[in-house]
Amino acid sequence: MKENKELVGVKEIARRAKVSIGTVDRVLHNRTGVSKKTKDKILAIIAELEYQPNILARRLASKKTLNIAVLIPAVSAETNYWKAPLDGILEAGIEVKPYGIAVEQYFFDQNDKTSFVKQADQILAAGVDGVLLAPMFMKESEKFADECKKLRIPYVFINSDIPDHDSLCYIGPDLFHSGSLGAHLMRYLVSGNDQVLIVNISKEIDNLHHLLRKEEGFKDYFKKNGLNNEIIKQDIRSTDYASVKKELTKVLDNRAIKAIFVTNSRVSSVAKYLQEAKRGDIKLIGYDFLEDNINYLKNGDIEFLISQKPKEQGYRGIMALYNHLVHAAQFDKSYYMPIDIITSENYLFYNN
Amino acid sequence: MKENKELVGVKEIARRAKVSIGTVDRVLHNRTGVSKKTKDKILAIIAELEYQPNILARRLASKKTLNIAVLIPAVSAETNYWKAPLDGILEAGIEVKPYGIAVEQYFFDQNDKTSFVKQADQILAAGVDGVLLAPMFMKESEKFADECKKLRIPYVFINSDIPDHDSLCYIGPDLFHSGSLGAHLMRYLVSGNDQVLIVNISKEIDNLHHLLRKEEGFKDYFKKNGLNNEIIKQDIRSTDYASVKKELTKVLDNRAIKAIFVTNSRVSSVAKYLQEAKRGDIKLIGYDFLEDNINYLKNGDIEFLISQKPKEQGYRGIMALYNHLVHAAQFDKSYYMPIDIITSENYLFYNN
DNA sequence: CTGAAAGCGCTTACAG
DNA sequence: CTGAAAGCGCTTACAG
């Protein structure tokens, strides 16, 4: 019963349509130079046979490799968060290489828009078949996306989204719910009227909407559940430890704060401060599976870390492009990552 | 600089060795009928060139498909836990199909060893290239594994392990740490001298070592952290609700239990009981992302669910065999799944 | 023990 | 607008 499947190939289509396989190939790829009449006939046969091209043969015969460009922040001394997505990208790259896909990285500096633009231009100049990018800088990213669109180059966003911008898809966190989960966990750490502190640490204004979105989700949870804890908020716009220390001292000295929610991976500097200041009584929740953070998690200085599979984001981003380019696959517009909770008891088994 | 890579193929090897490509193919596949001398010469050239076979061409030319057999419990009315691994298996199956891999399922009844043996025999009779199995029944699984080994059929264990049995690898949970995490979460729900109850619900003695291992991890955490809560344990060997109810009533009526840890997915029947008995004061932790459980999680009857990526286990199992059969990949002996924590705030984003 | 040829299902020039 | 041929990098008989 499967046997008839065996016969379905360009050859069989050509036989039925009484044309050569070259012509079949032309309509398969929507190339010009085929009369409407024969094209329609071939199309009908393709539909009838439910023809599925053999991608092995296709990629073998067409010697050209498909190029995917990756545009993400460089791993910096300041934060190695982007190491994880890069690992995922590299892993996927190895996996798809045998199928004729080449992945090339273009790194930019998170603190420098011009480096983003420069790299984006490089990609355009190189001429690629697909792009995976972290659209950190709104305006610049939109511009780049528009260029890609014009050139009919598919692109995928990871880590943060620019909605309604015709990306193939978005792969990353749902920030609002991430914040709500933080609040939910917070609930196990405080009671009654304990005061809670939210801390945003970032000097990059462009990214601030990330943090704010988490903050919203956090506050929403408390309101929705009728909790009356006072929630105080502190923005820290210099990321060096001295500044963090100064700001924290100021807030904590004047209040009876019982627990802190740090909206990004900088939670380790808060942990460091609490340790130094001997404030083990204050519970801490923060973000990301980074070595520093894990160390504080281990000794109990951090209670929970929330993580959103940074490695998988990179991996899936490449795979989405691969599946689109090679298998012409369709996707959901958004693929939200799970919101993982990491504690001292399960961090050993976490894999990004 | 990459250009020389292009030349590396059977043709180039044959040219250098001054033999035909047929002979190269023979040594590539370790077939008989090649003199030691030419074989050595070819091997040397292969090594020197760092030859990597083109798997596209390989699978295209060799028309035969590779068959992978899957031996797992059937999804039953009693529990649909195995739906998730099956989904993962199916997904992987679709993914590898274009590369000439066929995946076939063989289901057995968790409560009937003979069905396992029967299906195992079927697989042996069918003659396959690889096996993915859940070795629920120890002795029978060992026997089957030994047969596979004799026939040089690679096999992968999922969900539970039989150590030292030459499987290609094991993909599943680390049960002990899973239990410890349960205890860690429990700590947020109880205080001081609150009593804690562990509940095992299962009629299948074979699987009991699973549950016991989790129990050990749970208890170990309390001991290790110097907690003095009294831990009571209750085994329930009939899985119907009436029995669960009866047993729970008995335990709970005589004690001031503050929280319950259920060692498997049956946590929903405990939740049901607590709801009926209006014991919302008792906190509940259990296992697995199943619809019933999630419903109780949503209304707060269950506080935490622990899950270990059942779908991913199936997916990775197939992929491991695929990578081994097609790419001759090597693996770690054990691949432990992350231990995920699911709450009312993040279940929407969980994906097995 | 070894080689020469055909073929896997496509794509890519080239010719008309 | 269409066809015939060569070739992608392998494997598979078959012949010697």
Image (cartoon, coloured by chain):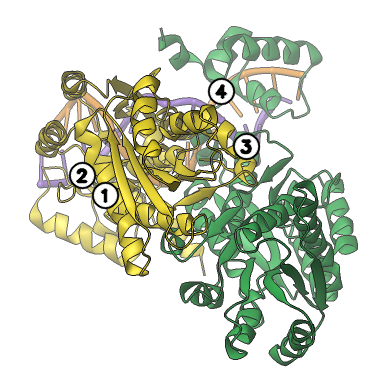
Chain colours: A green, B yellow, C purple, D orange
Q: Amino acid at mark 1?
A: Arg
Chain ID at mark 1: B
Residues behind callouts 3 and 1 on a single chain? yes
Left/right of residue A323 with respect to residue B336 in the rendered view = right
Is there a contact, CB below 8 Å, between mark 3 and mark 1?
Answer: no
Residues behind callouts 4 and 2 on a single chain? no
Helix, strand, or loop for circle 3? helix
**Residue at 13% of width from left, 37% of height from top?**
B142
Chain ID at mark 3: B
Q: Amino acid at mark 3?
A: Lys
**Residue at 26% of width from left, 29% of height from top?**
B237
Q: Earlier in the sequence, mark 3 or mark 1?
A: 1
Task: Determine crowd level at label 3: few under 14, some 14-19, many 20+ residues with C-alpha closer than 10 A.
Answer: some
Residue B129 found in image quarter:
top left
- Alpha carbon distance from label 3 to label 1: 28 Å
Helix, strand, or loop for circle 4? loop
Left/right of residue B274 with respect to residue D16 in the rendered view = right
Q: In the picture shown, does residue B44 fall above or below B175?
A: below
Mark 1 or 4, which is nearer the eye? 1
Residues behind callouts 3 and 2 on a single chain? yes
Q: Is residue B14 visible?
A: no
Residue A272 found in image quarter:
bottom right
Left/right of residue A214 with respect to residue B128 in the rendered view = right
Q: Which residue is mark 2?
A: B26
Residue B315 position in % (x across, y down) = 43, 39
Residue D13 position in % (x across, y down) = 22, 24
In the image as oriented, which residue stretches furthest toward the front?
Answer: B254
Task: Determine crowd level at label 1: few under 14, some 14-19, many 20+ residues with C-alpha closer than 10 A.
Answer: some
